[in-house]
Amino acid sequence: MAEWVDVIVVGGGQAGLAVSHELGAFGVEHLVLERGRVGQTWRDRWHSFCLVTPNSTVQLPGGAYAGDDPDGYMARDEIVRHLEEYAASFAAPVREGVEVTALGAAAEGGFRLSTSHGELHAGAVVVCTGAYQRPYRSAGATAPPGLLLLDAEGYCNEASLPPGKVLVVGSGQTGCQLAEELRQAGRDVVLACGRAPWAPRRVGGRDIFHWTLDVGLFDETLADLSSPAARLIGNIQATGHGGGHDLHYRVLQQIGVALVGRLLEVEGGRAHFANDLAASVAFGDVRYNDIRRRIVELCARRGVEAPEMPDPPPFDVEAPESIDLSGFGAIIFTSGFRPDYASWIQFDAFDEMGFPIQKDGASTVVAGLHFCGVHFLRTRKSSLLVGVGEDAAIVARRIADGHSRSGRGDGLTVARPSSQRPPERE
Ligand SMILES: Cc1cc2nc3c(=O)[nH]c(=O)nc-3n(C[C@H](O)[C@H](O)[C@H](O)COP(=O)(O)OP(=O)(O)OC[C@H]3O[C@@H](n4cnc5c(N)ncnc54)[C@H](O)[C@@H]3O)c2cc1C
């Protein structure tokens, strides 16, 4: 007979651990299944990776950052250590090395999870498999023979790339950081740019992330966006490297990265780009001006003087629309992510973009199915270290309420089978 667990959490990243912490606080029996090790996604990031948000924004429930560098940006291994210590601090019931390969309905009610280590059944499931699941390669993602083509997930460091110039496709935080790292290592770098917001790293001596939290940017919901697709637009271009500094198109141009428009196609040994670099820069400037306006309005409401935020400096938009790829060693795609739930979850519970159809993390299609850590699950900060805890508490409370309404193990989607119930207490 398959093992029964009242609640199974799939994924042992920050979202899965935060949900586990909160379920534990409500006394709900549960298990976290993690295909790799705790914090596996962070472990898999490139060698020099560090946070873009300051350390003080690590606000996991019972696991807030308490170190001596709240304004710094933890490096990859420090983030992993933080998550490991967090899991240990409340003895999170994590089974590492267990991949859930399919999630469907069990014949007797509840959920059936096929895993790399056998089958489990559960009364409720919380899917925490990551905000950024499947790397998305934009159109034209082919390469002439001999040229290495990889996603950011496959990039370790500059030395691991073949010699030659590098084309980076996608200019969110990741693309800008890789372009800077490669340029500083002496590579000739071409960055195919898209639309992304930018802002100075610090405004009035304070990290931009704190300002954007204060003005409510991260409390915005999907309904506040111009369209559901707008949730795919990247976060503000910036970096935490070297203590944190500005990192946007103007900075990259200054250090010698060649900026071009969106990649259209690779054909006949040449890469072709749209004539839209000026439009992408203008898009970022509009976003910067919007953030600037919101900060000025906030300061006015608080009755304090607004910090200085200069106009965007001039930008040279001259860019080739086609380049010869001979002399290039690699093309790195950093053009975003798409959800990947439908490949293993056997319920028709996702919208046309592949995001869960849900309210406050609870599927509105399948009772007992929950999500946490999804980009814009509730707000813009749902997928971030600063916001995931708030959502985890809401998801856990809902499960705990269902759990306690009608006694142990039931009130989820299905009662624990009688053969697996512990004996009643006297
Ligand atoms: C490049 C990059 C930089 C970022 N920088 C920041 C930052 O500076 N600050 C910030 O707050 N946020 C940042 N984020 C966003 C976010 O905090 C991270 O993406 C974070 O990893 C999300 O945590 P999570 O727990 O939701 O997902 P993940 O960390 O992706 O955890 C999901 C876990 O689920 C496991 N898993 C997946 N599928 C299965 C399965 N079928 N069975 C079992 N286990 C499974 C994975 O192995 C993984 O460990 C960044 C994101 C990216 C992509």
Image: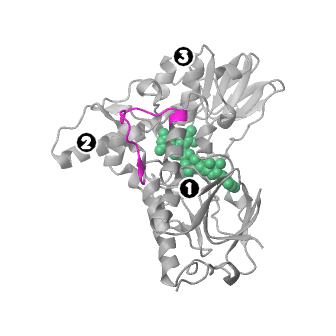
Labels 2, 1: front one: 1
> Can you tell me whether the CB of the residue at mark 1 lies under 8 Å from the nearest atom of ligand 1?
yes
Identify the residue at horizontal 46%, vertical 33% (top origin): 238
Q: Which residues are magenta?
A: 61-78
Q: Is residue 252 above or below residue 204?
A: above
Point out the tag, 1 or 3, that comes first from the N-terminus: 1
Residue 270, x across and y down, in percent: 75, 25
Magenta-span inclusion, residue 66: yes
Pointer 2 residue = 296
Identify the residue at horizontal 52%, vertical 65% (top origin): 361
The N terminus: image quadrant: bottom right
Mark 1 to mark 3: distance in Å?
41 Å
Q: What secondary structure characterizes most of the magenta part?
A: loop
Mark 2: which amino acid?
A: Val
Pointer 1 residue = 16
Numbered marks: total: 3
Looking at the image, can residue 394 be seen?
yes
